[in-house]
Amino acid sequence: MSEVQIGKNVNLEKIQARIESHIDTLSTYTATPGRGTTRLTYSQEDLLARQYIKEKMKEAGLTVREDGLGNIFGRLEGSEKDAASVLIGSHFDSVPNGGSYDGPAGVVAGLEVAALFTENGLTPKYPLEVIALIEEEGSRFSGGLMGSRGLVGLLAEEDFKSLKDKDGITTVEAMEKIGLDSSLPKPRNPKTLKAYLELHIEQGPILEEKNIPIGVVEAIVGLTQLEVTVKGKAGHAGTTPMDRRADALVTAAKMIAQFPELAAAEGEGTVVTTGQLQVYPNGANVIPDQTVFSVDIRSGKEEHVQSVIQKVKELADSYHDIGMEITVEQLLYIQPKEMNKEIVSLLREKSNKLGFPSCSINSGAGHDAMVFADYTNTGMLFIPSKNGLSHSPEEWSDSRHIAEAVHILFEAAIELTEAE
């Protein structure tokens, strides 16, 4: 038995069974049964999931609260008064028809770390907080990372209130519908944060191909999300000649078709994706007069992100001469982020001492950890994704790997909270 296990009761089989129960239960809170997890922020499925998460926080001996964004906190009080907290968790929203592990695996890991503190009778000097964050995916309200951005003060109150979903429902209206209070405090003083730890599935093939169960994240890719609005002129599909049309959808399609070439020209792993597109008035026999689409740009180097943003804007400008009005709005911009080197070393050390093989890895996806990295010491672990799949019903990760990551995070949290 390694030295970090001495005197601590850590039963991986028991933890694994609880993890499977948590994941299985949370996966039932979906608007698309049998077709993956669809749990949009402030939906009825969100309400059911948050009720379950709060119940499990209380069972772990935590004091539960929510903020004005709907983020959930379960707090194990520390012995030192008014001390900064060590946060551990992830998000619990999903993309449409997504998987059961993206986000919830990290929330469940936080619950299990807190349960181990309680089961081992540990009293932290610095408080331990399990956090379940909202709207990381940006599937309902554009931009993504809304829970973490709002928590650290990057999302202004007026901007939060002005956000609407595709049906025109505001954040405040959606919160009220499921009984949440948007008037509660939102931003949190960074001085109350000692560290942030997050477990996430890799969402790629590297760990599985290497047959390594733990990835210690060193850096997270930079990303931006743009919203492009193309305005043309509506007309009858049968009576408007082709040379007299100002078709917003055709113009949007021409722009989108050029994005792969923009990404390839930048190189070094730069990727550009359009995943959302709305057509108005959306009639089969009406020429579209407006099209709105998303542009997701990611790269490990900030100069490539900036370059693609500029090229998208130049591409938009090139269509003005043919009578199209195109606007490009930047909804989100986050620089590439390095994880805290001391926490990276700590996670690697705990993994080695516990006998769990690990490797360094960079994240090609954005995570709440990249937001926290500017405000507190941040660390992140990855576990393998089967066949590298994510954002699909086929998404799956081994609960044993999650349990092993929980053990690593538990040992790291003991040190970070200086628990006794």
Image (cartoon, rainbow, N blue to C red):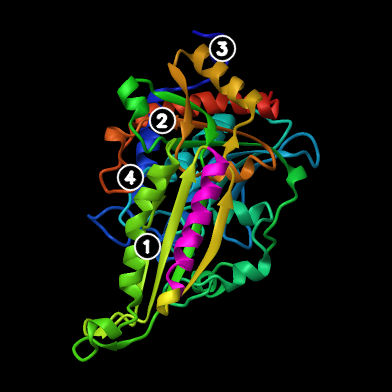
The amino acid sitting under disc 2 is Ile
Q: CA distance from mark 3 to mark 2?
A: 25 Å
Q: Position of residue 361 (x, y in %)?
A: 47, 27
Residue type, numbered disc 4 = Asp
Q: Which mark is residue 6?
A: 3
In the image, taking residue 175 as reference, residue 34 lies left or right, namely: left
Looking at the rendered image, the disc whose residue lies closer to the viewer, 3 or 2, is 2
Q: Going 39% across and 58% down the picture, which residue do you hit?
A: 39
| Distance from the alpha carbon under mark 1 to that under mark 4 | 41 Å
- The residue under label 3 is which amino acid type? Ile
Which stretch did the figure color magenta? 301-320
Q: Nearer the viewer, mark 4 or mark 2?
A: 2
| Chain-order first, disc 1 or disc 4 | 4
The residue that label 1 is drawn on is 255
Q: Which mark is residue 383?
A: 2
**Residue at 57% of width from left, 14% of height from top?**
4
